Image (spheres, grey):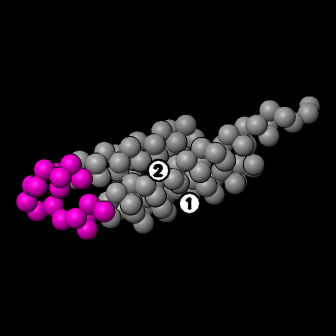
Amino acid sequence: MSISAIESVLQQMRVTALNTGIAPTGAAPAEAGGFAAELKRSIANINGAQQSAYAQAESFELGKPGVALNDVMVDLQKANVAFQTGLQVRNRLVTAYQEVMNMQA
């Protein structure tokens, strides 16, 4: 997997995050922190989406007013999509790492 392919996957993650309503935690460009910082921010965004969705689901279960079932289900699905995207990125990174390690000098 080439650098451009990894950058393409990161761009897809950003678009998915924006489409699901997950706001990035920092407005700093990826170049400022590098790949590791961008990956850490993406994981933090996924975690935040999951925590928010689970908190909203718990509020609905407890019967708190103002929490609708459809909002809970949509937020849970957004969190699931974000998690699945992160999982696919991880799988592609592992595959790329294995390919690099198997290269002959």
Q: Residue at x 52, y 49 (%)?
A: 86
Above or below 97: residue 30: below
Residue visible at 72% across and 43% down in the picture? 95
Q: Is disc 1 placed on a helix, strand or loop? A: helix
Question: Is 36 on the left-hand or right-hand side of 55?
Answer: right
Is residue 61 covered in magenta? yes
Callout 2: SS: helix
Name the residue tied to disc 1. Answer: 12
Q: Amino acid at mark 2?
A: Phe
Disc 1 marks a residue whose amino acid type is: Gln
Q: Are marks 1 and 2 in contact (CB under 8 Å)?
A: no
Name which quarter of the figure residue 21 lies in: bottom left
Position of 18 compared to 68: left or right? right
Disc nearer the start of the sequence (1/2): 1
In the picture shown, does residue 77 fall above or below 87? below
In front of the other: 72 or 43: 72
Q: Please state the horizontal and vertical placement of residue 93, each as a whole percent of the image.
A: 66, 43
Mark 2 packing: few (<14 Cα in 10 Å), some, or many (20+)?
some
User: How far is the residue under mark 1 from the one under mark 2?
Assistant: 13 Å
Q: Which residue is mark 2?
A: 83
Q: Which residues are magenta?
A: 57-73
Residue 102 in percent (x, y) is at 84, 34
